[in-house]
Image (spheres, rainbow, N blue to C red):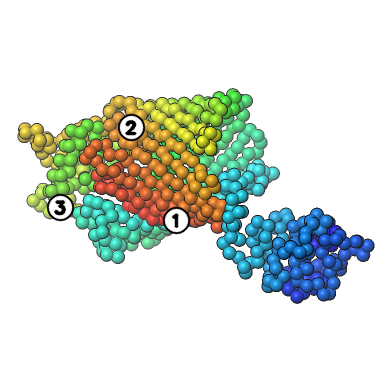
Amino acid sequence: MIPTDLLLAVLLFSGQPPVGQEGGDASSSGSDASANSEADAPPDSALDPEPDADPEPDAAPEPDADLDAEDDEDAMMDAFFGGGEDEDEDEDEPDSGDSGDSDDSLGGPVEGPVPEGEVERETILSGTEVAPAEDLDLTDIFGDSETIEDLPDAKDIEPSGPANGSGLFNGKLDLRLRVVSSVYIDIDNIYEGKRWNPNQPTLAEHAEVPSAFKLGQAIPRGTVSRNENRLEFYFAYKPNKHIQIVGDIEPVFLGVSQVSTLNDLSSAQMLTPFHVESDAAYVSIIDALPGLDIKIGRQIVVWGTADKFSPTNNINPDDLEDRPLFTEPIANQMLVVDFAPWQDKLWFQGVYVPLFYPALLPPSASFALADPQTPVNFANQSDRDKLAFLQGFISANEKFNPAVKTTVAPPPLNITNGQAAFKVGSRLGPVDLSASYYYGFFDIPIPFETKSTQVAPVMDEPVDGYWFNSDVTLVYPRMHVAGLDFAAQLPFLDDMGLWGEGALIIPTQQYDFRVELPLNLDITPGDGVMNPVSEFSGPIVKKQPFIKATVGADYTIGKHVYLQAQYLRGFIDDFGADNIGNYLLAGTDVIFFGRHLIFRFFAVTDFPKNRSDVASVVLAPNIIIVPPWGYATLELGGFAFVGRNDTKFGQTAVGSSIAYLKIAGSF
């Protein structure tokens, strides 16, 4: 490199571009280039070449008072992209940089540090071209077709920061912060027994207090069901190679006032309700013995190889309340011991959870149970027929429609109700295999008993609109689970992913559901015998082993299309030998602009169990936008439930179809 180019490169790398506006001379271009002040410009003498230097044949001409703008740009291009003796450029070919007659000037410095080798200027780089800010288009931001083809996936990019995160305390402390803001809007609910009813009122048309279970009323369209702001603080401190301390705290502001009385206006908790969550609060002892790690505290342990629907994953309860995060695990206090004598060739994991923690259910679950018309999954068809007759009688006789109250009976808090799990795994070539055992509880409650109480004579006025109360008790079934899972990539099929897992579930006892009737009633009229009864019962869960399983595959076409499909034997809430359904999940990601824009669409459908059943569907479209400046992700999507009120995904328990907007920022 000639001395002139060397000095220009030094000035460029130091953040002081020497090129001025069109028509300026080289001796004064430094002061014209700076957008902040003339004080930042280099002295004129700094641009003069050494007197004894002989220019190379294709080097930029020596600067003088008559140097035009095109020569300025050539000099800058040579210094920035490697001109002078390292380049043999044909003078007859057009310049690869900006044309000399373009009206571009260098802007001021951008925020943040300037990466090594880049000029501090108000431009955006696309490939090897520098585009002036005033001439930008989408290709300058996202890249053209050629540069996009060369872009790696975001997951394959190595982080450029310190190896241990923030790098504080010599890399021993990792700090992360994430801010998430979201709003969900109800767009559909059950109305007059079906979804997508054109007669369902909008929020503007609905003047009364909404109730999904009074005939002719429903939660109106346009209701804001969620307006959440979440701060997620995570840290991991590793003072030495044997100890790691990990914590996570997430204050959640609901953003919807809970005020209902005048006294509530004096309560900050009611005006701005919030709660605190945590996904981690544990201490890890690494290599307590060779290959032996111990973690004690609040944590998440995920088992299984399937995507979201893993029948062998039972240690942590599921978050079923937030639709976009459906089946995300909830942290719990536990002891985890990992032992890997031969690394991934053979490893063991043991888990003990002293206290049971239930799944987080959506509000629609309790609303649905309060609806006497909600289907109940009796194990025997004869019991289902009895319930159907009772529901028909209540529907035809409004005075016998009860006010339903629920009581959940969790396992007692003692050491005998702890949960234990063990897993052994290995890697054989490209295949990961593991076998597991879990002893504990199913984290979604099932109905156990219903007691009926008359609160007013049917000839008198009702009490709060009802003549009868119905008290429902729910319990959590205890179970044994033996599981197997595998995952592999198939090189001979262009690295197609394949996975599968199965769980043999054995309830420890039979769970019967006892139903008290509001009056003596013959609920088996088809048998030709008058037999009025005051109650009936039947098994919800038999003491009979059953299998839940998932098999899936995914495939990537080029860099722009991702495909996935899974067969599910048993959904997340299916439990019992006679209550296991079959489902198909399929979806795709269509990726643009180097993963800055993703169109996602997934759907789940159930298969009818018999000719009288009809299928129901969940449709989940989604658009994910990652701005070119990084640090933020914008998500716009929805969940649409399509089906009759007596179907899996159409019943009241699944809640309203929603549209949602979410933005997350992290560093």
Tag in front: 2 or 3: 2
Category of crowding for the residue at label 3, using alpha-carbon neighbours closer than 10 angstroms: few (below 14), some (14–19), many (at least 20): some
Visible in this render: residue 91? Answer: yes
Residue corresponding to mark 1: 636
| Mark before the other along the chain sequence, 2 or 3 | 3
Number of marks present in the image shown: 3
Residue corresponding to mark 3: 462
Identify the residue at horizontal 24%, vertical 59% (top origin). Answer: 199
Left or right: residue 557 versus residue 654 is right
Identify the disc placed on residue 579.
none
List x then y, in percent, for residue 469.
Answer: 19, 45
Q: Secondary structure at mark 3?
A: loop
Q: Amino acid at mark 3?
A: Pro
Tag in front: 3 or 1: 1
Identify the residue at horizontal 61%, vertical 61% (top origin). Answer: 140
Q: Secondary structure at mark 2?
A: loop
Q: Secondary structure at mark 1?
A: strand
Q: Amino acid at mark 1?
A: Leu
Identify the residue at horizontal 16%, vertical 48% (top origin). Answer: 395
Comparing 609 with 46, the one in front is: 609
List x then y, in percent, for residue 427.
Answer: 54, 27
Left or right: residue 665 versus residue 603 is right
Left or right: residue 49 versus residue 483 is right
Compared to residue 150, the image places residue 584 above or below, namely above
- Location of residue 582 (image quadrant): top left
Tag in front: 1 or 2: 1
